[in-house]
Amino acid sequence: MKLIVELTNVNQIKRFSKLKNVKYLLINYKGLSLNYSNSFEDDELNNIKELAQKVKLGLVLNAERLFSDDDLHVVKELISKKFFDQFDYITYSDFGFKQLLSEEGYQEKLIFRAPTYLTNHQDVNLYNDLNAYVVLSSEISSQELIELSKHTNKNVIIDLFGQNVCFYSRRPLLTNYFIYRNTFKEINPET
């Protein structure tokens, strides 16, 4: 098993490199990425690339946003600057973007990721043939993911979500919610 972890801070690289199964860092870039908490600029990308190479971690670009025709002109400029060369893989969900990158020889780097798609093995196998990898839908249950993965024609990627702190408050929000809903659950604030 190989893990791809989202990089939100350059300082995380050293820590991630010490984790046994982490092999790639998912990088968010403004103008290309979708659903990210932090993105990086060109100067930061150079630093990330150097640090990642030192600790033998690969880079995956999140390029999952949807593109208009005007946006694709920006992608063409990035292609001419060899921007995509610095990444081992590129996640995408827009087929115009995929077409441009495929025409320029990036086909073997493409990972199709559209969280509401790829819920059956026929779709998975079709898209697997068109890409280096695909990410299975995060909209189905873990049991469905297990069954689906048994019928794929090659390895696939599954989204995992770790513990993430949303916010901290001393207000009894959950307790008040349960009282409002007439649901009496004991809430242990220590957990």
Image: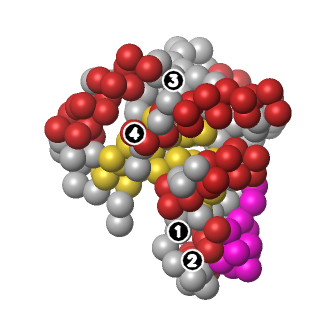
Asked whether the beta carbons under mark 3 and mark 2 sit within 8 Å of each other, the answer is: no
Asked whether the beta carbons under mark 1 and mark 3 sit within 8 Å of each other, the answer is: no
Q: Residues within 10 Å of mark 3 (few under 14, many from 20)?
A: some
Asked whether the beta carbons under mark 4 and mark 3 sit within 8 Å of each other, the answer is: no
Left or right: where 191 falls relative to 12: right
User: Residue tagged by mark 4?
Assistant: 86
Where's residue 63, x and y in %? 60, 39
Kindly report the distance in space between the C-alpha atoms of the residues bearing marks 4 and 3.
16 Å
Q: Residues within 10 Å of mark 2 (few under 14, many from 20)?
A: some
Kindly report the distance in space between the C-alpha atoms of the residues bearing marks 1 and 3.
25 Å
User: Residue tagged by mark 1?
Assistant: 156
Q: Which residues are magenta?
A: 116-127
Where's residue 171, x and y in %? 59, 15
- Give the mark toward the camera: 2 or 1: 1
Quarter residue 174 falls in: top right
Q: Pick whichever of labels 2 and 4 is earlier in the sequence.
A: 4
Q: Residues within 10 Å of mark 4 (few under 14, many from 20)?
A: some
- Give the mark toward the camera: 2 or 4: 4
Where's residue 173, x and y in %? 65, 22
Q: Using the image as rendered, state which of residue 188 and residue 64 is in the foreground.
A: 64
User: Residue tagged by mark 3?
Assistant: 39
Kindly report the distance in space between the C-alpha atoms of the residues bearing marks 3 and 2.
31 Å
Asked whether the beta carbons under mark 2 and mark 4 sit within 8 Å of each other, the answer is: no
The amino acid on which the numbered mark 1 sits, given as a three-letter code, is: Val
Kindly report the distance in space between the C-alpha atoms of the residues bearing marks 4 and 1.
23 Å
- Give the mark toward the camera: 4 or 1: 4
Q: Pick whichever of labels 3 and 2 is earlier in the sequence.
A: 3
Where the N terminus falls, by quadrant? Answer: bottom left
Would you place residue 7 above or below residue 18 in this image?
A: above
Where the C terminus falls, by quadrant? Answer: top left
Say which mark, if any, is on residue 149.
Answer: 2
